[in-house]
Amino acid sequence: METLPVDDVLHRFLLEEAGVRGVLVRLGPAWREVAARADYPPALHTLLGEALAASAMLTGNIKLDGALSLELKSRGGLRLLFTECNDQGRVRGLARWNDPLPDPLPLQALPDAIMAITIGNVERDQRYQGLVELAQPHLGEVLEGYFAQSEQLPARIVLAADGEHAVGLMLQKMPEEGGRDAAQDEDGWNRVLHLTATLGTDELLTGAPEQVLYRLYHEESVRLFEPRPLVFGCSCSRERVSAMLRSLGREEVEAALAARGDEIEVICEFCAQHYYFDRVDAEHLLSSGAVAGAPQTAQ
């Protein structure tokens, strides 16, 4: 019998009798790679892990060409939170904050906060963005509200993160036209919610995905689809850094060169990749739009 992956995996499933579809994401090494980039305060560490799992989880039931990102900005201690999952299953994320940061960190209390879900391919200029109302303290509840408004379908979202794992479980009631069972089993959604309520945070974080799903829904005819692998990965490139420098204009680029002795160093905040541009490189990209040289990684 084939052993299913336990960490860094996305499972899609269908509860056929109840007319409910679901996605379960469990991140291990990929989450720890993201978390290790900064010494995040405990409340922000948890929120970042939940958001990373959520960004992967939300790709489960859509046809994705490009990437899906969650981005939150506020004028309070939490300045920025960004997580992303692309169509290759690569996840990345970061957060920026000012001390002191509240603990707990209720989302609805963040001053002048804006959250957006962006889906699409930036390089093809094909993007859809939806704004998420921050009316609840927890990210799972906030996303449930988003689905209720944007799709007029109920969803249940459970998120958790600790030092080892970040996990997300999403359930969506299927519309009646989605299948005959959805129309026949009128109590299916409520029954599934009741079963899901028995899931504790510890079990969600420590249990293997197929074991969690079997324990919760073994009486609901769980249909598991092929698992999708996930991995930490960054979409940065020398071409993108060059485009960023070009957008700054000659005056800014000249100032950056002068500040470091005729060399510009750009470090990706997501993956710590280093990119170097000397004066010849900078003149080349500013005058012709071409990209000179090869990426270098700091030793």
Image (spheres, rainbow, N blue to C red):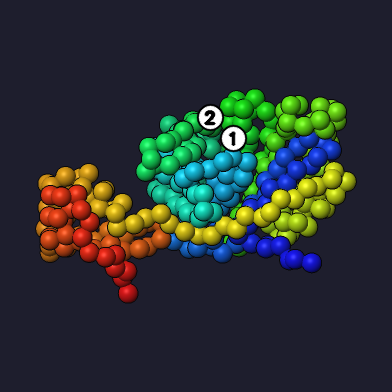
**Is residue 78 shown to the viewer in this render?**
no
Type of the residue with mark 1: Val
**Residue marked by disc 2:** 133
Q: Position of residue 199 (x, y in %)?
A: 77, 48
Crowd tier of the residue under label 2, counting other residues whose Cα lies within 10 Å: few below 14, some 14–19, many 20 or above: some
**Residue marked by disc 1:** 142
Place residue 9 in its image quadrant: bottom right
User: Which residue is outermost to the right?
Assistant: 219
Q: Residue at x 48, y 39 (%)?
A: 119
Rendered view: 178 above or below 295: above
The reply to whether dot 1 and dot 2 touch (C-beta < 8 Å) is yes
Q: Residue at x 20, y 60 (%)?
A: 292
Q: Position of residue 86 (x, y in %)?
A: 50, 49
Place residue 4 in its image quadrant: bottom right
**Earlier residue among tags 1 and 2:** 2
Type of the residue with mark 2: Glu
